[in-house]
Structure formats: C-alpha cells, structure tokens
Image: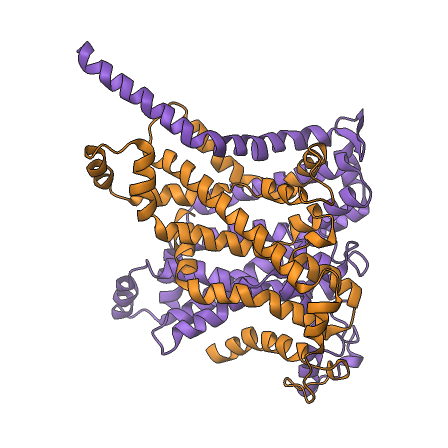
Amino acid sequence: MNTARNPRFIRRRKESLVAYGFLAIPMSLFLFLSVGIFFYAIYISTFDWGIMGPTEFVGFDNYEKAFSDPIFLKAVRNSVKYALIVVPIQSALGLFLALLVNSKIKGSKFFRSAFYFPSIASSAAITTLFIFLMAPDGVFNGTLQFFGVDTANLFNQGAWLSDSRTALYSIIGLNAWTTSGTMMLFYLANLQTVDSQYAEAAQVDGASRRQVFWYITMPLLKPAHLFVVATGMIGALQLYDQAILAGGADGSPDYSLMTVVLYIYNACFRQFEFGYASAIGVVLFVIIFSLTLLQKALFGSAGWRGEN
Amino acid sequence: MLIFYSVLTIVPFLWSVGTSFKPSEEVYQSNLIPNAPTGEAYATVFGKIQPNFQTLFANSLFIACVVVILHLVFASLAGYAFARLHFPGRDVLFFVVLGAMMIPDQLRLVPMYQMLVNMGLINDGPSNYLAIFLIKAISAADVFLMRQYFLTIPKEMEDAAKIDGAGPFQLFSRVMLPNAAPVLATVAILTFQGTWNDLFWPSIVLQSPSHWTLPFGILQFKGQFSTDWPPIMALVVLSTIPILALYIFAQRYIINVQLASSAKG
C-alpha cells in the first residue's frame, strides 16, 4: 500500500511543480495587473491624490463629490441613455442580419462579409469617416436633400453632431451600424447549432412563420441573446473613442457627448484629480458588475419567453 | 434588403477612398469619383505631417506584434496548466483569471497610470513602449480560450508521447501546441486587430509624437486639420487596409472565435 502510494505522491508533487512553473509568469501578471491594480484603485479613491501623489485621506468624500457634480450626473445619464438605446438596436439588427444571411441564398457568404465589414476597422477611422459624412455639407445631408428634405431648415440645421439635441443619437446610429456586424456573428454561431427540425415540425403542425420565429427560433437563441446583450451593455457603458473624436475632451456640444469614461479621462488628465477619477472608475466597475450579475440572474434562471 | 444593407456598409468606405483622392475644393461635392483626382493628400500624410504615416504605421505594427507574442506565450502556458495539470489551488487561481475578465480597463486607468509613473515608464524615451506592453501583457479571455481548446485535444495523444519518454514541457511544445494551431491563430488575429485598433491606452500612455499609433494619429490630426478632409481620409484609408487584408485572409478564424466565445456565454 505504502509503496504504491509513494510513487504516486511523488508524481503528483512533480506535476504540481511543473504547473506552477507554467503559471508563474502569467499568474504574477494577473495578480499584479488585475488584482493588485483593482485594490490600488480603491485605495487611491479614498485619498485627495494629485499629480504629486496622495495629500490627504478623505474616506468616501470623492464618491460624494461625484454625485453632487452636475456634469458627472450628465455623463451618467448620457452613458445609460446611450446603452439603453443602442443595445436593443444593435442586437435586433444583428439578429435580423443573421437571419438574412443564414437563409440559403446565393452569395450569402459575400453578404456576411459585407455586413461584418464596419466592425473590423478601428473606431478612430470609422468615427472620423462618420463625422465627415454627417457634416452639414456632407453626404448624409446630400442624400436627404436628394429625397426632398430641406436640411438647412431642419430643427438642427442639419448639424447632426454639433447640435446637442442630436449628437448622442448620431453616435447611437454610428455604433448600431458598426457593432451590428459583430452581433450578427454571435447570432450566426448560435443559429448554426440550432436544429432546423423543430421549426420544420412546427410548420408541419400548421404554425405560421411568425409563430415559428417567436416560439421556436427566439427561445432556441437564448445563449446568443444573453451574450449579445451582456457584451453590448458592457461595451456601451465604456463609450469613449467615439465621444472624444466627435466631441473632444469636453464631450461638446454642451456636454451632450460627455460619457462616464470621458469624465474619468478629464478628472485624471485635465484636472489631475487622481483620487476623484479613481472613485468614478470604481463606480463604473460596480455598475458594470451588477449589470452582469443581473443579466445572469434574469436570463440564466428565470427562464425565457416560450421556454417550458 | 440584403443589397440595400450591403450598400450601407460598403459605400461609406468607398467615400473615404474617393475623398482621399479629391482636391480640397471638391470635398463637399456629391461625386464619389473625383473630377480632378490628385495624390496630394497621400503626399501630405507620407511626407509633410509630423509624425508621418510611416512612423505611425511602424509604431502600430511594432506594438501589435509584441502584444500578439506576449498573449500567445502567456495564454498557451497558462491555458495548458489549467486544462491538463493537477495541482493544489487550481480552482482558486482559475477564479482569479475569471475575475480579471470582470475588471474594466477604465477602472485600471488611474492606478495603472500612477504605477507607470512610479516605474518611470511615462516618458519621451523608448521605454515608453514598455508601458503599453505591460498594460496589455496578458489577457484573461485568451487564457480562457486556450484552456477550452486544450480540453478538446484527446488525452491519448499525450499518452503516446509519454511512453516515448517526453517530459512535461515537451508534451506542451511538441504535442499540444502543434495541435492547437487554429486557436493560436485566432488569439493572434484577434489580439492583433484589437491592439492595432486601440485608441484608449495609446492616447493615455504614449507621450512623444514619435511613439503615436495610427488611431492616436488620426485623433490628433483630426484636430489639427479640422476640415481639410482629404489627408484625414487618406489616413483613414491607409490605417484600414492592413486590417482589411488580415480580415480577408483570416476570415474563417475570426468567425470561429465568435463561435467559441459565444458558446461560453
């Protein structure tokens, strides 16, 4: 018994050592760059911390300060509004495109590539192009004029990105367009694992196409719904590139493009209030984290429409 | 419907190409193809601007390649250990990896920047590149992806090599890695694309203009040129071509990873 256990014990110990060898650098990096940084963020957020380092321990003052700053509240409203509008649009559009491409028509491969195309370029390139197309004299207004819209006399004079009433919605349009390609791929991946037998059986039983879609296809796509909405929400709350490109660091005009992340950037690199900026980073993390948990709870256990 | 939406996705890019060849007085005219095509915008971005396109391109390429190598090495090492080896604390350590996935970059911004300042990496010199490499050194999602893939490789393949006397590192490098080519390609492509396109960290960390990447250059020059669109569009076009080429060659890997990552969701 003992002689049998001994070599096994030695082998186990050897395997452990090998494993720690493989993991030494990767895990140190995680502990340092994620775990350590996470606690460092919380630590910094409790100080009055300027460019020269900490000056005074202030407890939760930075957090209180954030929630009494109208610009921060505006940034939160903008980010949440953006997320709540863009996620349903990009998900629905992604699903729609996936269903289009999934049908067995000629050239579906080409269309799949075409639809995914806006998702591959950098946000800097795409947003710059978009700003150009949306300029008052740009292609977008030119197209509207072609269809008889008098853009110069619109409520915003056709200045989509420099009018505070339309700037955020324009960015929503931009990102619904660029991200729907990625969302389409997630849905396609799911669609390809769905057995078409269910839909066929339902059709034989006399279900209409609409019924098949709502009661068969949609419930079977639950994993994709969960994934698309969760990643969409997390991405949407991190809006930064498009906002700084279109509205500068102030999120112009009139803070209409000020987002939470842009606000962190300002607090850190223009006001040099590191403690304050860090506190807002922690707030953003809490929002994203609870949304993730909420989605897991909602989609994960409570069930989905049509699911028995 | 299909054709309409394809027009919507492709025409804007054609417009950027068209505009990049236009003389400035034609910019707001509604013709896609310039009446008097000119390469002036390209002459500007290759020559007159500081840093010029070549510098931006070289920086983007250098940074993306180093980050790809780091991700491949660390993700395959850690992925292998989590997929195949047994050791005390495995679940705890794997939980740390999953936890790391939950921490958004925006939370890391301030502490990371402060730490890089403390380390003296926020500067005008070449060590500024190290700051970017450190920030992006490892990706929890890639470790997860590698682990999932290694789990699908049959154990028998390792057993055969073990009988031939292969040690643990040989099992990893001679048996597992060659069989993991598709997932390695996926990690490489997605990392390259993500790093190439990233604006957030370069705009925060890179100090000297001679270190700027293409997206950061576009942001800066968009401010400088304001409405002189042809050179800006030339930058947009030139920065998109490499990523487009990558996409054309590697489409099947990109589609594959979407499958893999949505399966875990």
Q: Position of residue A191 (x, y in %)?
A: 37, 61
Q: Nearer the viewer, residue B102 or A291?
A: B102
Asked whether residue B253 appears in the rendered view, the answer is yes
How many numbered badges does the structure rendering display?
A: 0
Q: Position of residue A234 (x, y in %)?
A: 57, 49
Q: Which of A19 and A223 is in front in this view?
A: A19
Q: Residue at x 63, y 54 (%)?
A: B59
Q: Position of residue A93 (x, y in %)?
A: 51, 66
Colour scheme in the image? by chain
Q: Which residue lies furthest to the top in this view?
A: A2
Q: Which residue is drawn at 68% across and 73% down?
A: B42
Q: Position of residue A279 (x, y in %)?
A: 71, 36
**Is B74 on the left or on the right of A16, as rendered?**
right
Q: Nearer the viewer, residue A94 or A300?
A: A94
Q: Residue at x 68, y 66 (%)?
A: A128
Q: Residue at x 40, y 58 (%)?
A: B253
Q: Nearer the viewer, residue A151 or A55?
A: A55
Name the image quarter holding residue A38.
Answer: top right
Q: Which residue lies furthest to the bottom in this view?
A: B35
**Is B180 on the left or on the right of A201, as rendered?**
right
Q: Chain B is drawn in which colour?
A: orange
Colour purple, chain: A
Q: In this view, does A49 lie above or below A212?
A: above
